[in-house]
Amino acid sequence: MFKTIVVPIDLADVAVAKPALDAAIELARVSDGELRLVTVRSLMPVTYMEYVPADFDATAKAEAETELKALAGSLAMPKNKVSTVVRVGSVYGEVLEEAKASGADLIVVGSHRPSMATYLIGSNAGTIVRHATCSVLVVR
């Protein structure tokens, strides 16, 4: 069924990803698939670069990798069936690129309850649904 399942994780709000992770784990189990956890860091605006240490990006990426690997290690999945990646850029763009690069056949994404802002300008989950080339499951 689904061999490679990409699950975007917002490390600042892991609770939103919890239901999506649970669904992805179950889908991976029944289809003997693998999970690919991805977190996306935003680009630092150039105007702020002079106010942060020179190694800020590398340090922040290393911290994100550590957090994501810890989360992956806590899942009830065989370790060889879970991988992680930290990407930098726009959330939906990088999730879609990771799905393409990893050959994913499913993206399982958690979503907040819709608010007026997401009805007017859209959300990351909505954009992923509209532009993905593979199936997408949105878990609330």
Image (tube, rainbow, N blue to C red):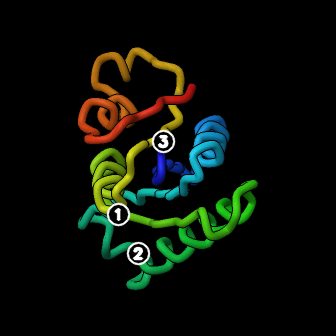
Q: Which residue is drawn at 35% across and 63% down?
A: 88
Q: Earlier in the sequence, mark 2 or mark 3?
A: 3
Local packing at callout 1 (Cα closer than 10 Å; few below 14, some 14-19, many 20+) is some
Q: Nearer the viewer, residue 139 or 135?
A: 135
Which disc is residue 57 wearing?
Answer: 2
Q: Which amino acid does label 3 sit on?
A: Met
Mark 1 element type: strand
**Residue picked out by circle 1:** 88
Exactly how many numbered labels are in the figure?
3
Contact? badges 1 and 3 (CB < 8 Å): no
Residue type pointed to by label 1: Val
Q: Residues within 10 Å of mark 2 (few under 14, many from 20)?
A: some
Q: Quadrant of the C terminus?
A: top right
Q: Is mark 2 on a helix, strand or loop?
A: helix
Q: Which of marks 1 and 3 is nearer the N terminus?
A: 3
Contact (Cβ within 8 Å) of mark 1 with mark 2: yes
The x and y percentages for residue 47 are 25, 65
- Amino acid type of the residue that numbered disc 2 sits on in the rendered structure: Asp
Label 1 or label 2, whichever lies nearer to me, is 1
Q: Which residue is drawn at 35% across and 53% down?
A: 99
Q: Nearer the viewer, residue 124 or 24?
A: 24
Is 38 placed above or below 117 here?
below
Residue 79 falls in image quadrant: bottom right
Label 1 vs 2, first from the N-terminus: 2
Please give the residue where the numbered disc 3 appears in the rendered image: 1
Q: Residue 140 carries which label?
A: none
**Residue 126 image offset from top left, x and y in percent:** 35, 29
